[in-house]
Image: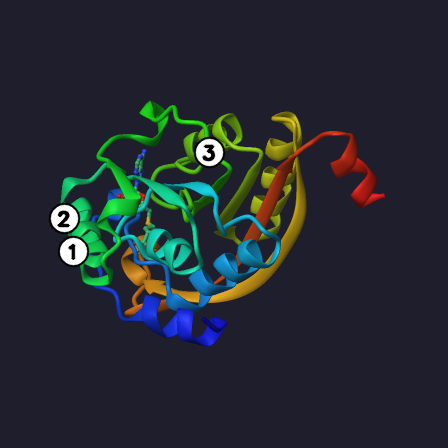
């Protein structure tokens, strides 16, 4: 599997039928998803690992992780309409047996996993909607990948929030995505926004050594 192939497969998955703005539902674009997954794969955080996809939506990140050899994925998603689409996408690729779907709020998920992958709400509709996601991720895994708005205030918040929770940022890749304008109340149909893809790890001696 090449990165480009991964991007193409993920771009062809079924998207949300009626995206719900209050849940900030937009399908993770193939390119951003493959950037995140490729980074995780290259660093040994996917193959043979147990993974949680928080706010799994249509399952773009879940499917991508399985294509790259994840052992098992917990897909946590609050919206039953999204879960229906997620199930169809898994079925198309024959991945139903490798995924545990939890139709619940991320705060109600308690399994310990090797790696969290997620594209949480940015908090543009509901202030701080990203916080329960980060908190849960830091609680259940030592390695976390996540996508956030690439704005100075957000970067500062993420750095502090990670540090306060005992995590450090080891990687940050900047890219851009196109998302439906409804999330930002703009007039254009699609809005291009800059996003950062983060890798966090729990702060311990070896993590500190590798940074300095
Ligand atoms: N990566 C997914 C969706 C990202 S959008 C995809 O590519 O399809 C964010 C997702 O988080 C949406 O599906 C939304 O319904 C879900 N969500 C929002 N708040 C949630 C919460 N508190 N608990 C669980 N899921 C939530």
Which structural element holds mark 2? helix
Marks 2 and 1: CB-CB under 8 Å? yes
Q: Quadrant of the C terminus?
A: top right
Does label 1 or label 3 sit earlier along the sequence?
1
How packed mark 3 is, by other alpha carbons closer than 10 Å (few <14, some 14-19, many 20 or more), is some
Which numbered marker is on residue 88?
1
- Which quarter of the image is occupied by the N terminus? bottom left
Q: Residue 191 at what x, y percent from top left?
A: 37, 66
Q: Secondary structure at mark 3?
A: loop
Q: Quadrant of residue 9?
A: bottom left
Q: Secondary structure at mark 1?
A: helix
Q: Earlier in the sequence, mark 2 or mark 3?
A: 2
What is the number of callouts on the image? Answer: 3
Q: Residue furthest right?
A: 212
Query: CA separation, marks 1 and 3?
Result: 24 Å
Q: Is residue 150 visible?
A: no
Q: For this rendering, which residue is in front, 147 or 200?
A: 200
Q: CA distance from mark 2 to mark 1?
A: 6 Å
Tell me whether circle 2 and circle 3 mark residues in contact (CB < 8 Å): no
For label 3, the residue is: 113
In the rendered image, residue 181, in percent from the top left (x then y), is placed at: 31, 62
Which residue does the numbered mark 2 point to in the structure image?
84
- Give the label, 2 or 1, closer to the camera: 1
Q: Nearer the viewer, residue 75 or 95?
A: 95
Q: Give me the residue at 30% from left, 46% from top.
A: 98
Which residue appears at 59% of the width and 38% of the height?
A: 157
Q: Position of residue 144 (x, y in %)?
A: 54, 41
């Amino acid at each position: 599997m090449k990165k480009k192939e991964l991007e193409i497969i993920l771009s062809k998955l079924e998207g949300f039928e009626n995206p719900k703005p209050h849940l900030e539902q937009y399908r993770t674009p193939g390119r951003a998803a493959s950037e995140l997954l490729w980074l995780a794969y290259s660093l040994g955080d996917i193959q043979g690992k147990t993974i949680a996809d928080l706010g799994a939506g249509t399952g773009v990140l879940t499917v991508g992780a399985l294509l790259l050899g994840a052992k098992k994925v917990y897909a946590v998603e609050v919206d039953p309409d999204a879960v229906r689409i997620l199930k169809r996408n898994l079925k198309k690729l024959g991945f139903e047996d490798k995924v545990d779907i939890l139709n619940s709020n991320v705060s109600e998920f308690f399994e310990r996993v090797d790696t969290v992958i997620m594209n949480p709400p940015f908090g543009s509709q509901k202030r701080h909607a990203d916080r329960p996601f980060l908190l849960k991720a830091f609680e259940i895994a030592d390695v976390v990948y996540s996508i956030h708005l690439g704005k100075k205030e957000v970067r500062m918040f993420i750095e502090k929030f990670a540090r306060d929770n005992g995590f450090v940022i080891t990687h940050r890749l900047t890219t851009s995505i196109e998302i439906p304008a409804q999330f930002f109340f703009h007039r254009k149909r699609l809005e291009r926004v800059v996003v950062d893809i983060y890798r966090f790890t729990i702060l311990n001696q070896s993590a500190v050594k590798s940074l300095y």
